[in-house]
Structure formats: structure tokens, C-alpha cells
Amino acid sequence: MARKRFRDVKGASLGRPLSGYDSRTGGFGRARGDGSRLVIGLLVAASLGVITIDAAADESSPIDPARAVVGGLVGPVEATTSGIVRPMRETIAYLNANDELRADVARLSAQNSQLRSQVEKTPLDRNRLEELDGLTRTANKTGYAMVAARVVGMGPMQSFSRTVTIDAGTSSGIRQDMTVLNNDGLVGRVMSATRSTASVLLVLDTDSVVGGRLGTNNEIGFLRGRGVTSDRGRLDLDLMDNTVVPAKGDVVVTWGSQNGKPYVAGVPIGKVESVYSTPRELAKQAVIDPFVDFTALDVVGVVVPRDTDGDRLVINGTGGDR
Amino acid sequence: MTLSRTGLVGAVILLAVIMQVAVFNLVAVNGVVPNLALVVVVAASIARGPQLGAVVGFTAGLLIDLAPPADHVAGRWALALVIVAVLAGRVRGDARRSPLAGLTTVAVCSFVGTSLFALSGVVLGDHALPAQEMVQVIGIALLWDLVIAPFALPPLIALFDRTRSAELAY
């Protein structure tokens, strides 16, 4: 009966006192006015509409301009906020580091004595080292040109995707489908770029597929992200040739796509952690432990064409850090 | 609601979304961060009813969907947060009465919101994880939201109440 009475009251916000009006109806007593129901219905329909429009479009979604506008507005705010909290981030990292350092000291002193015994073999290794050095120099000469950027935002895992925002965008020459890497290896690829920021899809994401090549036998395969970042994310490698069994510890590098889009060739991704086969599939699958620590991403490099002219310094392979 | 009050609500939504992306990753557990936007929507719904809650939910959701570095199909968070607003609006009388009820509302809304988002992902085949991992993420998200709710919910409810009293004056 009470329900009936309230149903006749139009609008939800007529300033009726809130306490005590529905104490007997067990919490579900508030019957909403028709206006409220209409608004909610419209909003649900609008959400479903946006989802349909965006999901139906495959290449260029009509939502993309809206994404660009919001990205252009929100991106710089993210960058500023991230800059403000950076000292805090470093303090937390410092505190965490203190604990880790103690463990490191123990581990390193053990390693040190081990290394001392190896020093005796040095002259033998020196020749090999020189060769390697030469190779590195060549790699440097043919190396890629990069624009350095900082990670300013990280997509929440609640969205079940692994994405980050970086603080460089089209004004620095960054476009869609460029390779993103850091000192350790492959990070991901640029999904979209606004003027001052870009969104990067990490290789960990379940939607990310990277062509990979095994370091020892050049076998190619596809790496898929598992989407999880429980401490360290993992990737799954499916090899094309199902007779090949990857060796544990084998390094996987990118195989490279046409024109280096979205991935340039030869970037280290990770090493084989374990190999397993499923009865359902013939091919062996390998679990890859990526070199990059995705929970502590900070400075990354975006591979750009050599002649890029933007508002940021382009680091060329010849004299760069890599 | 006057223009300035609308602006205030908009600023709160924007701040919540930015915090989630740029600040909370300091404390992320397995990549899961406190869902402040969801708490804002729950607060709006409790203080002002499901209608305003749904508007706030739609706006906040769409902002999460469109702001970098989001990659999923747009509208998924918008839908989830509108439903959360309706849910919170249904129990708003009880949720105001005791802090415990408020916390419970946040917990239920967090579970429903993240689950709805996960479900829409499964339906659309968009960033769908294995069920077990989704459940893990939903669980951690719920705990995070419970941790921030005691600090965030009362001031947010008070803030949304203020936007209402202004309306009464007109």
C-alpha cells in the first residue's frame, strides 16, 4: 500500500526526508518515479548502443574520435598527476628495495666467489667477447631509432586488459602500431596516439599476439599474453612446426612484421620457462618468462622511423643505450 | 542542479578516474587497483537516488571506457556502473542507516560491477580471461573497494548531499 502511494510521487528528488520512509519494507521499499525509470532505461540503452557501435566496427570505430578527444583532454592530466606522485612512487620503491637489498647482498656474495673462480678462464673467453662486441656494434649501427617516453598511467586490471599510457604522442612522431621496448626487451605496441600521449597494449594482454622466433633454431611461432600479472606475467608460445621442442632457457626474439608494423624484428621478448603439450593439440606449447618487469615499467622507447622529426630527441641506434 | 554543482560532480568523477589510472597503480595488487569511480557512483546513488546515480555511473563509466589507456569495447564500464547505480539506489535507505550497511553495499556493488564488466567481455569476446583468473581479479577488486570505502564513502555522500540541499533552496 505504501508502495502505491510513493509510486504516485513524481521524480526522485523532491526533497522528501530520507529517514524512516521505508523502514518496514526491508530496504527495497523505495518505488522510483516514472521519470527516474525512464532516465535509467535510457542510460542502459545508451550504454548498450555504444557497446554495439564499438563492437560492430572492426577497423575504424565511430567511437575513435571520441576516444581521441577524451585522450587529448585526460592524457595530459594523467601525465601531470603521475609527475606529482612520482616522488611517492620512488619512496615506495626505495622502501621495498631495502628488504630486497638484504637478500641481494647474500646472493651476490655467493655469486662473487663463484665468479672469482671463473676469472681464471678469462683469456679464453676474451676472444669470444671481442666477437660479441663486434656483433653488438653492428647491431647498434643497424639499430632502431627510438623516442624515449615515460609510463604515466596503467589501466586497472578490473578492465581485464593490460595497457599503459605513455607521455609522448603524435607530436613526437608516435603513430599507431609502433613497437615499444625498454632496456630489458619487448614491452608492447602502440594502440592509439593522441597529441601528447599514447596508449600501449602490453604483450601480456590476452588480445596481444606477437610473432616470435626461437634464438637457437630460428623456429617461428606466436606468442599470446595470458593477461595475468600475478607478480610476473607469462606468455604462451605456439610453434608453427609441431615437431620442434623448445629448450628450456631458450631466448625468444620478435620475428618482425612487414615494414616493422606493429613489431620490428630482433627485439628480445623472454626465455622459455617450461614446455608442455595438450592432448587436444599436436604442437608443443612453451611458457615464456618475459624479460621485462611489467609491474615496474617506467622509461620505455618507441621505435620510430629514422627520419622522424618531433618535439623529442630521437635516439639513434648508433650512439644509443642499446 | 546548478551549473557549478554539475561541474563539481563532473570534477569528482574526473578525479576518481584519473586517480585510478595514474596514482593507484602505486598500490596495485596483481594490477588490480581500488575502483574509486565505483565508490563515487555508489555514493551518488545513496545520497541522491538511482536517477542521479545512473547519470554519474554512465558518465564515469564512459570516461573509463574512453580515457587512455583503455582498450576494451567502449560502453562496457558505462553499462556496469549504471546497473551498480540502480542497485545502490534500491538499498539507499538502509545503506545510510549504518556504516556497516554502507560497506556491504559497496562490497555487493563492487562484486556486481566487476562481474558485469567481466560478463560483457565474455559475451563480446573482448579481453576475456579464464574464469578462474577473472574470479581472482573480482575478489581482489572487492577487497580493495572495501578498504577505501570507509575513507571515501562518507565524504562523498556528504558531498552529494550538498548538491541536493542546493536544489531544495530553489
Image: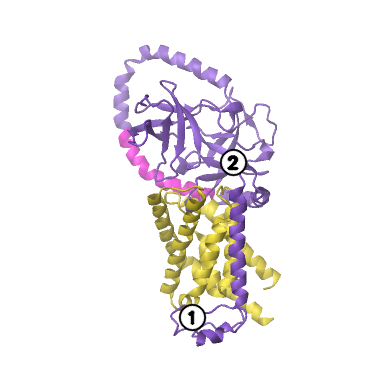
Chain colours: A purple, B yellow
Q: Is residue A80 above or below residue B46?
A: above
Residue at point 42%, 73% (across, down): B101
Quarter of the view holding residue A176 = top right
- Residue A237 seen: yes
Label 2 resides on the chain identified as A
The rendered magenta stretch, by its main secondary structure, is classed as: helix
Q: Is residue A22 above or below residue A240?
A: below
Task: Identify the residue under disc 2.
Answer: A191
Asked if both marks, 2 and 1, belong to the same chain, the answer given is yes
Residue at point 45%, 69% (across, down): B105
Q: Earlier in the sequence, mark 2 or mark 1?
A: 1
Q: Nearer the viewer, residue A128 or B113?
A: B113
Task: Identify the residue under disc 1.
Answer: A29
Q: Residue A34: where, in percent of width, then height?
A: 61, 77
Q: Is residue A10 above or below residue A67?
A: below
Q: Which of A225 and A295 is in front in this view?
A: A225
Q: Residue A299: where, in percent of width, then height?
A: 54, 38
Q: What stretch is highlighted in magenta?
A: A85-107
Amino acid type indicated by mark 1: Gly
